[in-house]
Amino acid sequence: MKTACVVIVMALVSWNCGGPRAMKASINETAALDGRSMPWNPLQGNMIAPIVDKRASTISILYGNDAAVAYARSHSIPEYPDGSVLALVTWEEQADVRWFGGQIPGRVKSIEFVTQREGRATYERFEGVPLTRTATSGESRAAELLSIRAPVTVN
């Protein structure tokens, strides 16, 4: 009897996993970025810090170019060197169809850029579909983004 139950369970598992209803791997195109209208494509940089806002149902990732990432990972004072570019990409959350209860990035809500040049930070914000520039000033918001710290990892 035990053997029969095991065989039935194994058959159900293999049918469910490999049958015609099996999900095929795909790219989350809803969360993709079109870098043509922006000063820099954040997904070509490296992640500095992830941020999840449960109240707003958003997922954000702070990306940086090589100069910004190197500085963020080794300094705690937000005085990025000239040439640093930070980009905070914020997505709406959406349910992950492959993982019950999981949340993944959905539609891009906004992208905020802070560029450090000649000792001064410049700020730009892009929103909407397609992404269009909606703000070019915001010293206090730029300061907020510059103050986000990279998580500390211990080996």
Image: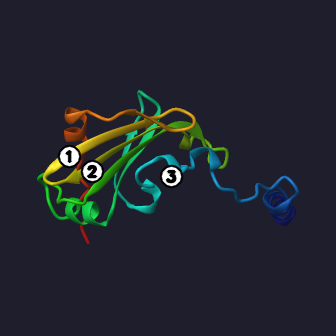
Q: Amino acid at mark 2?
A: Thr
Mark pair 3, 2: CA separation: 16 Å
The label on residue 35 is 3
Q: Judge from the rendering whether residue 151 lies leftward or rightward of residue 45; answer left or right.
A: left
| Above or below, 127 relative to 102 | above
The residue that label 2 is drawn on is: 115
N-terminal of the pair, mark 3 or mark 2, is 3
Q: Residue at x 40, y 51 (%)?
A: 39
The residue that label 1 is drawn on is: 121
Q: Residues within 10 Å of mark 3 (few under 14, many from 20)?
A: few
Q: Judge from the rendering whether residue 123 lies leftward or rightward of residue 7; answer left or right.
A: left
Quadrant the C terminus occupies: bottom left
Q: Place residue 74 in its image quadrant.
A: bottom left
| Above or below, 94 relative to 152 | above
Q: Position of residue 122 (x, y in %)?
A: 25, 44
N-terminal of the pair, mark 1 or mark 2, is 2
Q: Judge from the rendering whether residue 152 lies leftward or rightward of residue 95; answer left or right.
A: left
